Image (cartoon, helix red, strand yellow):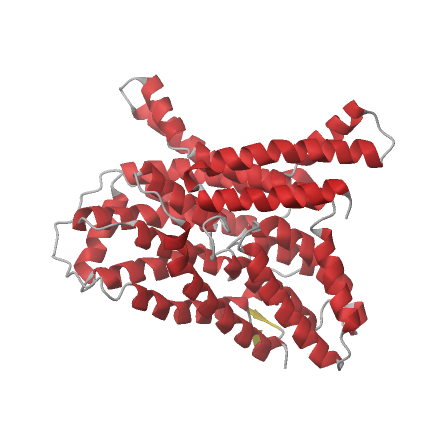
Amino acid sequence: MNVIQIIALVLFLIMYALMLVFSEKRPYITSGAAIIFIILMIVNFSTNQDHTFWEAVNATGVQAFTDFSSWNVLLMIAGTMGVVAFFIESKMPSLMADVIINKVPNVKWAIVGLSLFSGLVSAFIDNVATVLMVAPVALTVCKKLKINPVPSIIAIAISSNLQGAATLVGDTTSILLGQETGMNFVDFFWMHGRPNLFFIVQAGALASAFVLLFVFRKYTQPLEQVEKTKVTDYVPSFLLLGIIVALIIASFFTIPVPWLDSMKNGIICITIFLIGFIRKLIKTKDDKKEVTKEAVKSLDFETLILLFGLFIVVGGLGALGIIGKIGEAFNSIANSLNMSPNATIFVLYTIIVFISVIISAFVDNIPYVMTMLPVITALLPGLGLAPGDNKAYLLYFGLLIGATLGGNITPVGASANITGIGMLRREGYEVKTSTFMKISVPFTLVAVLTGWILCFVIWGL
């Protein structure tokens, strides 16, 4: 590694350490680190290539700010945040909370039920969108019962993140896998005559539900029957449903313009938000400026800035060649194993799953998966595998299981976790890393082990 790479790696580790310790300062920490990484990329580009300083600035700026998959995620989050604000204002979450309170015997089952529900919803729409939809319901339940909402929101966030690997539209990482392997929406359910990721993830969700039942075992407060909230405006609910349906439909189509295709999900979400915003402006008889201020305020800019900073930092790691060294390490391991082909594949599969868990606990899984997918494709010929072989899919699915579920370990490992904590912060609750990990670590270990075993049984034997 050269000097710039070493500096970048040390800075990266310092950034994450500071984020874990100073949770309330995360947006400022990532923003500062992103600026330093841009400077490092400029220096690296101008030093290693025959370009002037300003050519390096221009090239680095393009590289840092034209990652359309990152803008896609940010637009999805922003658009969904705005629609969810209308959804909350319509009092629909309060009605859903009332229904749950009237249907389950105690708080424990209410929290676990909401977590399982959020997981199932998250299999079909973005994890962050799910948290923004379901978390307000849990917050309302906790407010009505006067209990701390922090454990409930953590459970919902990690359950949502777990299900991101279940379908093609569940998470950006699933979309990336589909692009690399040519899988379509149906393939995630059944492929080559075998049950696939959807059922593997559901098994992990069921196993991890027992962890939540244990974590919330003392939440035995009975739920008294309450009068149901009246909802007078159902349009925001239809807007949210519209997001779900539109994202599913969009997964079956490819736009000929590459950058537009990369951002289509984000454009869908932000467009539906603008439809709701314009509708509210037309309907309101109040001050239009106040309505606009409320709409802007509904966008959690701290979370958006934090994610944007992370995308630049991790993208910088890739541009500086650091993430690429992970691929080199896997190649070295594959070449050094003196085993039969099947044993080598099993060992590599296991390493990919659990290394991905560890890395994704600290690195956003989108750029990581984006980097590792072509690495796995490059490994296949040396293992005697073609891209369409069942055992080739074992390695791809191992990456997705490890990277998607691994993000649950720390508060900054997944966008869904960051979003949930951001919602709690706006309610006046700060979430300590230790508090988060008391729930996330056992939940993640059970889910990963279940997925690791079942995926190998289905695709490795």
* Residue 451 to residue 249: above or below: below
Please tell me which residue is depicted at 85% across the width and 35% down the height of the picture. Answer: 49
Quadrant hosting residue 397 = bottom right
Report x, y in % for residue 423: 36, 41
Please tell me which residue is depicted at 72% across the width and 44% down the height of the picture. Answer: 5
Report x, y in % for residue 250: 55, 48
Report x, y in % for residue 147: 21, 51
Q: Is residue 217 left or right of residue 353?
A: left
* Residue 99 to residue 295: above or below: below
The reply to whether residue 207 is in sight is yes
The reply to whether residue 62 is in sight is no
* Residue 262 to residue 46: above or below: below
Please tell me which residue is depicted at 52% across the width and 50% down the height of the picture. Answer: 249
In terms of depth relative to the viewer, which is nearer, 350 or 283?
350
Q: Can you say which quadrant of the picture contains the C terminus?
A: bottom right
| Badge count | 0
Q: Is residue 100 left or right of residue 362?
A: left
Q: Is residue 63 left or right of residue 13?
A: right
